[in-house]
Amino acid sequence: MSMATASRVVLIGGSAGGLQAILTLLPGLSSRMNAAVIIVLHRQSRTDSMLAELLSAKTTLPVHEAEEKEPLLPGAIYIAPGDYHLLVETDHTLSLDYSEKIHFSRPSIDVTFSSAAAVFGEDTMAVLLSGANSDGVEGLADVHEAGGITMVQDPETATVDFMPRHAIQTVPVDHVLAADVMASFINNFAGVLAG
């Protein structure tokens, strides 16, 4: 793995039913993808440390909970820790924030998506999955406005269709796909690590 920070970022957000979609798409991600992946999943508590272990079982890419001031490296998957907002900083590092919940959520998908769009611009892909609230929709709009790519789970395939349906009705969405075909789009966007 290169120690240079990632020049592209893939953002994946979900709420109720989102974990199932992530577990479906994760095995298809290239082991040599040239982008950092950030997962923001609504969770119940900060002690839910089993998530990284669960996701690690589905991919050869390294998966762990994000830490303060950690650099975003290509080919790595970062999980927003429970009960913290996760932001992308201009130097391509991550920061944790304990400010108010947004859409009753901390971590908030909107917070991560919007901060990443401001830093990575057109080198951002944002994926919004199954869920029961509207978190992530404003973030998707910011990614679109920054020139990035927006992808939403096909509501017909989502466990809870409110979040993807609301996004499609509200934001210009580039791709509406079932979770099991998302990985190839993500791989194409991310490119392949040299060497």
Image: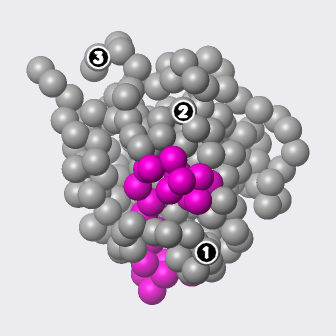
Q: Quadrant of the N terminus?
A: top left
Local SS, label 2: helix
Quick check: 90 left or right of 75? right
Residue 155: where, in percent of width, then height?
49, 81
Amino acid type for the residue under numbered disc 2: Val
Residue 71: where, in percent of width, then height?
50, 19
Residues shaded magenta: 139-161
Q: What is the quadrant of residue 176 in the picture?
A: bottom left
Residue at image location 19% in from the left, 35% down from the top = 192
Q: Quadrant of the C terminus?
A: top left
Residue at image location 61% in from the left, 26% down from the top = 89
Residue at image location 37% in from the left, 28% down from the top = 7
The label number, if any, that marks residue 119 in the structure image: 2
Quick check: 134 left or right of 29? right
- For residue 68, above or below residue 161: above
Residue 135: where, in percent of width, then height?
69, 62
Question: Marks 2 and 3: which is nearer the front?
Answer: 2
CA gap between label 1 and label 3 equals 38 Å
Q: Residues within 10 Å of mark 2 (few under 14, many from 20)?
A: some
Seen from this angle, which residue lies furthest left?
195
N-term-proximal mark, 1 vs 3: 3
Seen from this angle, which residue lies furthest right?
100
N-term-proximal mark, 2 vs 1: 2
Q: Residues within 10 Å of mark 3 (few under 14, many from 20)?
A: few
Local SS, label 3: loop
Q: Name the residue under label 1.
A: 170
N-term-proximal mark, 2 vs 3: 3
The label number, if any, that marks residue 2 in the structure image: 3
Quick check: 78 left or right of 132? left
The label number, if any, that marks residue 182 in the structure image: none
Q: Residues within 10 Å of mark 1 (few under 14, many from 20)?
A: few
